[in-house]
Image (cartoon, rainbow, N blue to C red):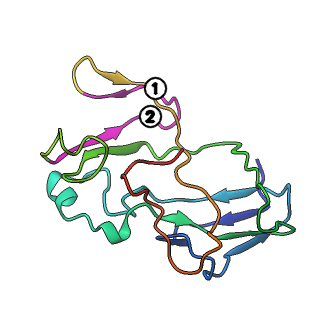
Amino acid sequence: MACNHTIHHHHHHFGWDRSIDPVLSVSPGQTIEVQTIDASGGQLGPDSTLTDLGNLSFDKVNPVTGPIFVEGAEPGDAVAITFLDFKPSGWGWTANIPGFGLLSDQFQDAALHIWKYDKVSMEPALYGPGGKVPLKPFVGTIGLALEESGLHSVVPQDGLAVI
């Protein structure tokens, strides 16, 4: 599918802030290819280890790509986004980060699992002998800058992702 625009992965920032200049201005109905980086902000990769997880800087987690200015949108409007396609990377990660997340009081040891899968067939990822997990593409975090000035975290206070 041909897109009207592309935003590359280096156009990211680490919070909602209405003072950040848009990298793109679009009219309603236009299509955009958005190239993103993972939730670690590129700090983890397909060959990462538990040591890399221990060196994770929370100042660089949960990046958001953009911002995008939607022509004609006014404060208080609802903006509808339709995702037409996903281009998976072939890898992903799951981690237990001590002191972070919903079950941090029950799982206190650090753990990291790197998932590798066929990005064309999207066959379920293997989680060791006999364990398969079906893959479902995840959009990540999207939203609109808050009316209040200043930088606002995209990570919810309780450490859970907002879907």
Query: Who's the residue at 47% across and 59% down the image?
Result: 37
Instruction: Locate residue 148, reporting x and y percent.
Output: 60, 76
The answer to which of 158 and 45 lies nearer the viewer is 158
Q: Are marks 1 and 2 in contact (CB under 8 Å)?
A: yes
60 part of magenta stretch: no
Give the labeled residue for mark 1. Answer: 123
Disc 1 residue type (three-letter):
Glu
Q: Residue 84, labelled with which disc?
A: none
Q: Secondary structure at mark 1?
A: loop
Q: Which residues are magenta?
A: 110-127
In the picture, measured across the screen, residue 113 lies left or right of residue 20, that is left
Relative to 50, residue 135 above or below: above
Q: Secondary structure at mark 2?
A: loop
Give the labeled residue for mark 2. Answer: 118
Tell me the quarter of the picture where residue 107 sits. Answer: top left
Disc 2 residue type (three-letter):
Asp
- Crowd rating for badge 1 (residues with CA inside 10 Å; few <14, some 14–19, many 20+): few
> Which tag, 1 or 2, sits closer to the chain's start?
2
In the picture, measured across the screen, residue 162 lies left or right of residue 39, that is right
111 part of magenta stretch: yes
Tell me the quarter of the picture where residue 73 sits. Answer: bottom right
